[in-house]
Image: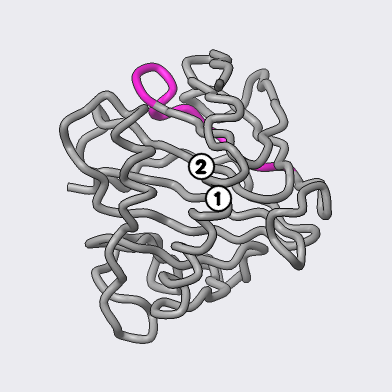
């Protein structure tokens, strides 16, 4: 049974998915990535990101020299695959909203990958939560403030943990400082998958 940890408005459901559910989810994601392969995006300044990305749903979140934005097609020009029902079930269990996510961003963290502190603010309705699912290696999740700077808190997220960012946490800065590469046996070659579910419109 999951333990719920609340920090700075972030609701962290530790151990939400058991091993069997995690393995089933990874299988579903492999089908998504076969249709929409992972890409290594660049920031608007042209700097390659350390994570590789794909998505499912009506929209995917992308970044390139043109800027950060949602797009209805993969960079290769194909539509994004549907969000798997196994992923939607997690949203329905924890999000507390009748709306369904329109984007499931898939980030893959290899050895040395990280995600700097940022806000999720490219969406139209900030009253809708963001739900994050961790699979594979542990990730050190940092939680900050609505404004840049100030004190932060960090917690290790393990495989099967689910984070709900709603209410006061919705526009707080957050990121992943590092992963413990090889700490999980879920993914045969190591690494961490993070799913981020968002209502876009």
**Residue pictured at 37% horizontal, 60% vertical:** 61
Identify the magenta region.
166-177
* Image coordinates for residue 51, horizontal then vertical, percent: 62, 62
Residue at image mark 2: 133
Question: Up-down: is 12 above or below 100?
Answer: above
Question: Crowding near pointer 1: few (<14 within 10 Å), some, many (20+)?
Answer: many
User: What's the CA distance linking mark 2 and mark 1?
Assistant: 6 Å
**In this figure, what is the number of numbered marks?**
2
Residue at image mark 1: 194
- Residue 155 lies left or right of residue 87; in this view the side is right
Q: Earlier in the sequence, mark 2 or mark 1?
A: 2
**Residue pictured at 76% horizontal, 61% vertical:** 190
- Residue 18 lies left or right of residue 83; in this view the side is right
Helix, strand or loop at disc 1?
strand
Considering depth in this image, is 12 or 31 the residue closer to the camera?
A: 31
* Image coordinates for residue 170, horizontal then vertical, percent: 39, 27
**Residue pictured at 38% horizontal, 38% vertical:** 90
- Residue 115 lies left or right of residue 34; in this view the side is right
Q: Is residue 48 magenta?
A: no
Q: Is residue 169 magenta?
A: yes
Tag of residue 173: none
The quadrant in which residue 52 appears is: bottom right
Residue 25 visible? The answer is yes
Question: Up-down: is 144 above or below 138?
Answer: above
Considering depth in this image, is 66 or 135 the residue closer to the camera?
A: 135
Residue contact between numbered discs 2 and 1, judged by CB atoms under 8 Å: yes
Helix, strand or loop at disc 2?
strand
């Amino acid at each position: 049974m999951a333990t719920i940890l609340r920090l700075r408005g972030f609701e962290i459901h530790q151990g939400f998915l058991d091993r069997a559910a995690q393995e089933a989810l990874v299988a579903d994601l492999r089908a998504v990535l076969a249709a929409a392969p992972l890409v290594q995006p660049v920031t608007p300044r042209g700097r390659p990101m350390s994570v590789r990305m794909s998505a499912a749903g009506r929209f995917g979140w992308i970044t390139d020299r043109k800027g950060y934005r949602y797009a209805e097609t993969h960079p290769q020009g194909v539509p994004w695959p549907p969000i798997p029902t196994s992923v939607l079930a997690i949203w329905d269990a924890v999000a507390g909203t009748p709306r369904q996510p329109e984007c499931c961003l898939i980030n893959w963290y290899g050895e040395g990958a990280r995600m700097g502190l940022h806000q999720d603010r490219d969406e139209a309705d900030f009253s809708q939560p963001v739900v994050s699912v961790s699979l594979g290696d542990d990730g050190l999740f940092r939680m900050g403030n609505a404004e840049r700077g100030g004190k932060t808190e960090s917690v290790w997220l393990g495989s099967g943990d689910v984070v709900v960012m709603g209410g006061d946490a919705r526009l707080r800065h957050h990121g992943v400082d590092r992963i413990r590469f090889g700490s999980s046996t879920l993914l045969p070659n190591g690494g961490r998958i993070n799913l981020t579910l968002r209502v876009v419109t």
